């Protein structure tokens, strides 16, 4: 993840997002700056307003590859695409491989893989994943756990 000191501040970003004078091209370009800096939630916010489906799709692909369930869910929501069972399964596998057990757990639950979700829960307990341990075993939430959750970033 590259750090970029030339990113707009919180106020500048809001002005770009909500000014009637801001072009889609400027929103897209600003979103690309955030994307290059690894600030994918900020980038998605701009891409959604700019209707930049191609770049939103790129973030979805990055989220899938890294197993970032919350980010993938947000990108797919912006794209207005349902997540298939096959995608949930791949997302769970990628999250587990990356050691993101909470994300793998949620993806398995969403895919309807109760046994795999239970296995991940046991695995998380053995490695001390406190966040997942605090989740009730039968709790299926609308939002993925806080790991990378949109809106949690304080600029």
Image: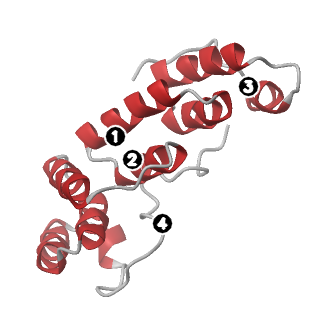
Q: Secondary structure at mark 4?
A: loop
Residue under label 4, please give it.
Answer: 143
The picture quadrant where one finds residue 123 is bottom left
Judging by the rendered image, the residue that carries numbered circle 2 is 72
- Would residue 60 be found to the left or right of residue 84 on screen? right
Asked which secondary structure carries label 3, the reply is loop
Q: In what element is the residue under mark 2?
A: helix
Residue under pointer 3:
9
Residue 31 horizontal/vertical position (percent): 59, 23
Of callouts 1 and 2, the N-terminal one: 1
Q: Percent from the top left, x then y, of residue 37?
A: 49, 21
Location of residue 18 (image quadrant): top right
Instruction: Name the mark nearer the viewer: 4 or 3.
Output: 4
- Quote the CA–CA distance across marks 4 and 2: 12 Å
**Considering only order in the chain, which callout, 1 or 4, is on the residue closer to the N terminus?**
1
What percent of the width, then of the height, locates residue 151?
61, 50
- Per the rendering, the mark at residue 63 is 1
Distance from disc 1 to disc 2, alpha carbons, whole Å, reads 5 Å
Contact between marks 1 and 2 (CB within 8 A): the answer is: yes
Left or right placement of residue 105 versus residue 126 in this view: right
Residue at 43%, 49% in the rendered image: 81
How many numbered circles are shown? Answer: 4
Question: Tag 1: Cα neighbours inside 10 Å, few (<14), some, or many (≥20)?
Answer: many
Q: CA distance from mark 2 to mark 3?
A: 25 Å
């Amino acid at each position: 993840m590259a750090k970029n000191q030339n990113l707009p501040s919180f106020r500048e970003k809001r002005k770009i997002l909500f000014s009637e004078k801001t072009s889609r091209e400027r929103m897209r370009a600003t979103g690309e700056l955030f994307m290059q800096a690894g600030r994918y939630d900020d980038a998605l916010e701009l891409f959604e307003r700019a209707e930049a489906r191609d770049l939103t799709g790129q973030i979805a692909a990055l989220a899938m590859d890294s197993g970032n369930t919350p980010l993938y869910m947000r990108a797919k929501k912006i794209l207005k695409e349902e997540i298939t069972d096959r995608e949930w399964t791949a997302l769970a596998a990628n999250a587990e491989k990356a050691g993101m057990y909470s994300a793998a757990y949620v993806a398995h639950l969403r895919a309807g893989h109760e046994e795999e979700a239970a296995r991940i829960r046991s695995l998380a307990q053995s490695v001390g994943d406190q966040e997942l341990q605090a989740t009730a075993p039968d709790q299926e939430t609308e939002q993925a756990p806080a790991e990378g959750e949109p809106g949690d970033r304080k600029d």
